[in-house]
Amino acid sequence: MISPIEPPHDCPLCPRLAAFRHENQKKHPDWFNGPVPCFGPMSAPLAIAGLAPGLQGANRTGRPFTGDWAGDLLYGTLLKLGMARGNYEERADDTLELVGCRIVNSVRCVPPQNKPEPSEIKTCRQFLISELDGMKNLKVILALGKIAHDSVLKTLNARIADHPFGHDTNYEIGKIRLISSYHCSRYNTNTRRLTTEMFESVMGKAKKAAGL
């Protein structure tokens, strides 16, 4: 199996993100402060595509969705549905393991205000392409939020206009099924745009489509 291309810890490709990362390295030298690696087995048939590391979540801990509210909902759901095992303790060295799924991000470095610029998403897409190409058993991609949805479509060479984002949308693109959800962020859950029941439902559909 071909290993995916990984950005270096001090990746310089996006100047704005690199500068923000350097600022945080000075403020928090004990944080991860680098492009966050993907998490889960490369042999998984399901990829869960997120947006980017959270400042005090993955950027601090070095593991996607670890240490913030979005991770509480995501990993709680995965554990409930049997797609993870162990204990989620909001740190990268806990006993949590993913089963049949792998978490990838559209952008590997934390962006200011959690908002990557289009050029940064485009620049980082080479790593998303490499990740998905390396997942030889991939059947389903669950995209969390519109940015991830659109970036996955471009990775699959599919037209965004033909596959508009929406919660619980379901598209077949070649051999890949793309299912999308509102992002499991604190804002979306606080405003009830996304409820726990809604998230569990769409995750369950992705699990079933992946044959898990």
Image (cartoon, rainbow, N blue to C red):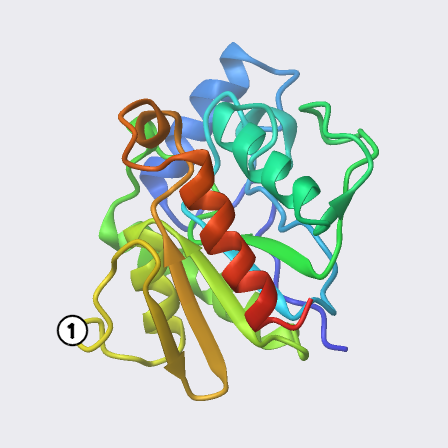
With 130 as the anchor, is 178 left or right in this view? left
Q: Which residue is mark 1?
A: 161
| Residue sticking out furthest to the top | 27
User: Relative to the observer, which residue lies in front, 173 or 63?
Assistant: 173
Asked which quadrant contains residue 6, the reply is bottom right
Is 184 left, or right, of 100 in this rendering? left
Pick the residue in front: 133 or 43: 43
User: Which residue is painted at 31% across and 53% down in the image?
Assistant: 167
The residue positioned 61% from the left and 16% from the top of the image is 29
Q: Is residue 130 above or below residue 29?
A: below
Q: Is residue 13 visible?
A: yes
Front-most of residues 196 and 15: 196
Q: How many marks?
A: 1
Residue 107 is situated, as x and y percent measured from the top left of the image, at 43, 49
For the C terminus, which image quadrant? Answer: bottom right
Left or right: 26 in relation to 66:
left
Is residue 24 rendered to the left or right of residue 97?
left
Q: Helix, strand or loop at disc 1?
A: loop
- Name, please, the residue furthest toward the bottom: 174
Q: Position of residue 136 (x, y in %)?
A: 67, 79
Q: From where the camera sits, is residue 52 visible? A: no
Q: Quadrant of residue 184?
A: top left
Position above or below: 22 against 197: above
On the image, the x and y values in percent for residue 7 come to 57, 53
Q: Which residue corresponds to the image point at 45% horizontal and 44% vertical from the top-left?
A: 199
Quarter of the picture containing the N terminus is: bottom right
Residue drawn at (62%, 51%) of the image = 38
Residue 209 placement (x, y as % from top left): 55, 72
Mark 1 closeness class: few <14, some 14–19, many ≥20 residues within 10 Å: few
- At label 1, which amino acid type do we have? Ala
